[in-house]
Image (tube, rainbow, N blue to C red):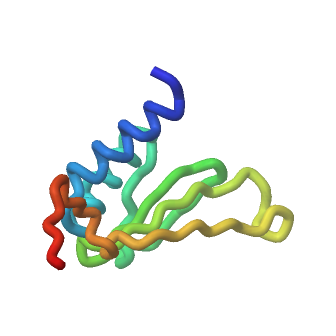
């Protein structure tokens, strides 16, 4: 399977398993854990080490994931990527109804 087809397949599988934000966060948590990320709790003190991978959830409907770099933050800064899990609720109708 080509990388493009695999990407499409993976996206459709994700959408299939994520009809709500809660399902989407659960699906993302599962994928992140498979990739070696560890979950952090907002209420705990964090001990972050260089090159470590983590994620945090809130209310089971929001998720932030990040990788700690190998350089100091002054030397490398940081990058942020964001997305919504609540819109369009990741729900597609296979046969939408139309009215005239």
Depth check: give the residue in front, 95 or 11.
95
- The residue sitting at 42% across, 40% down in the picture is 8
- The residue sitting at 35% across, 78% down in the picture is 43
68 relative position to 12: left or right: right
Q: Quadrant of the C terminus?
A: bottom left
* Residue 78 rendering spot, x and y as whole percentages: 71, 67
Query: With respect to residue 17, does 20 lie above or below?
Result: below
Name which quarter of the figure residue 77 lies in: bottom right
Query: With respect to residue 13, does 62 lie above or below?
Result: below
* Residue 58 rendering spot, x and y as whole percentages: 31, 76
Query: With respect to residue 7, does 39 lie above or below?
Result: below
Q: Quadrant of the N terminus?
A: top left
Name which quarter of the figure residue 71 lies in: bottom right
How many numbered marks does the figure carry?
0
50 relative position to 54: left or right: right
- The residue sitting at 23% across, 57% down in the picture is 18
Name which quarter of the figure residue 35 lies in: top left
Query: With respect to residue 87, does 3 lie above or below?
Result: above
- The residue sitting at 38% across, 76% down in the picture is 42
Looking at this view, name the residue that lies furthest to the right. Answer: 75
9 relative position to 82: left or right: left
Depth check: give the residue in front, 15 or 94.
94
Depth check: give the residue in front, 68 or 64.
64
Looking at this view, name the residue that lies furthest to the front. Answer: 100
* Residue 31 rendering spot, x and y as whole percentages: 36, 45
């Amino acid at each position: 399977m080509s990388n493009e087809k695999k990407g499409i397949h993976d996206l459709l599988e994700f959408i299939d398993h994520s009809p709500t934000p809660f399902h989407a966060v659960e699906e993302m948590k599962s994928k992140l854990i498979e990739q070696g990320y560890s979950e952090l709790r907002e209420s705990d003190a964090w001990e972050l080490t260089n090159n470590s991978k983590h994620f945090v959830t809130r209310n089971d409907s929001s998720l932030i994931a990040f990788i700690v770099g190998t350089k100091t933050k002054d030397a490398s800064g940081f990058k942020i990527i964001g997305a919504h899990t609540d819109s369009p609720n990741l729900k597609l109708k296979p046969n939408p109804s139309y009215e005239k």
